[in-house]
Image: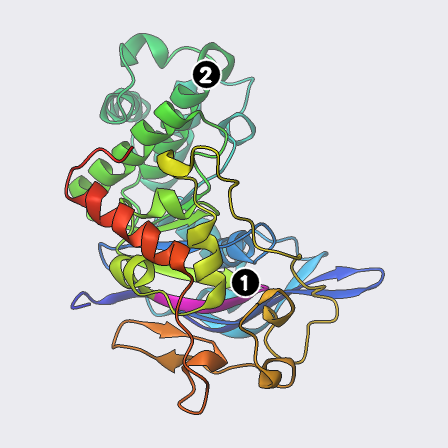
Amino acid sequence: MTHSKILEIEDLTVSFHTRVGDIQAVRGVDLELYKGETLAIVGESGSGKSVTAKAIMRLLSKKQSSIKQGSILFDGIDLSHASEGQMMNIRGKDIAMIFQDPMTSLNPTLTIERQIIETLRMHQKLTKHEAQKKAVELLEMVGIPQPEIRNKQYPHQFSGGMRQRVVIAIAIACNPKILIADEPTTALDVTIQAKILELLKDLQKKMDTSIIFITHDLGVVANMANRVAVMYAGKIVEIGTVDEIFYNPKHPYTWGLICSMPTLDLKDKELYTIPGSPPDLIHPPKGDAFAPRNPYALSIDTLEQPPMFRISDTHYAATWLLDPKAPKVSPPDEILRRQQIFERLEAGEVVQ
């Protein structure tokens, strides 16, 4: 990546306090985001993706959680120690977030215009008339027809896909440097999902914003991201360019995620699922957290956490299988079959 770093996370560790002990939700995450790129964070529910995003925005409850250690550097400020006043200035203006469910993100009692104007007047110091004009422009930009009329309406008068477009309009209102999209298409049907993803790609080109895209669906990532970070049990287990993750995955968990992706040619085959379930993060395992679910696990996996092994300048994976002393293991045949499908799709073929 030749672009400059816009965000740098080092050793981020986040815990949630419960009666039975602290849940170690994020365990020593290192991540970098570059100007103008889309970084996807993927993994099963509970892997720590959304907690990492909310930690960046400092949206985690102080009573129920705490950032135990690490730093989140943005524009020379460590967000993990920033005051609430500093964060109020950054949220919405420099770093904005699109949440999963548009209905809970919008206030049902206020018109769409009021909700967009609130952000504009707070961060851009526009007059009421200027803000109203900008609100119409924003709705137009996100593809809402008749924006002058729709602006005066309420969230319940919009479909799910249109509500998500409104949420995106609010998020981009102040031209943020970073846009965090937390499963922004999960609540939408597949056709609408594709349109929202296309919209985000178009907006990124126009605004040169950096996007952190959080999803459990690797299929969404293929056309959306430049780089992919795979998370499991609060840790990044593999990171690389989108091509490296899809065409040369190295971690058995990444293999499992790729094999779990539905394809049109499955027909009567049963969809693959990763056996077992994620570990208890109140008492995280001593070694590799994925070991109990990993058919390729080595004896060292139960004793020591693997380091991040370097595969290329942009590709790293935390698996003992990459240790020079480890036996040589090939990815499952299903991975190779999927890669052939990806290649045919990229070449524009219709895969039956």
Q: Earlier in the sequence, mark 2 or mark 1?
A: 2
350 sits left or right of 80 in the view: left
Question: For the C terminus, which image quadrant?
Answer: top left
Where is residue 108? Give x, y as percent.
55, 19
The amino acid sitting under disc 1 is: Tyr
323 sits left or right of 34 in the view: right
The amino acid sitting under disc 2 is: Thr
Callout 1 secondary element: strand
Give the label, 2 or 1, closer to the camera. Answer: 1
Residue 235 belongs to magenta span: yes
- Frontmost residue, 212 versus 239: 239
288 sits left or right of 265 in the view: right
Q: Residue sitting at 61 percent across and 72 percent down?
A: 291
Give the overall secondary structure of the magenta segment: strand
Q: Residue sitting at 30 percent across and 24 percent down?
A: 135
Q: Quadrant of residue 329?
A: bottom left
State which region is magenta: 233-239
Q: Which residue is mark 1?
A: 232
Do the residues under discs 2 and 1 have CB atoms within 8 angstroms? no
Question: For the N terminus, which image quadrant?
Answer: bottom left
**Figure label count:** 2
85 sits left or right of 95 in the view: right
Q: In the drawing, what numbered circle is on residue 111? A: 2
Where is residue 260? Give x, y as percent.
48, 48
Q: In the drawing, what numbered circle is on residue 208? A: none
Near mark 2 (Cα within 10 A), the count class, few <14, some 14-19 or many ≥20, is some
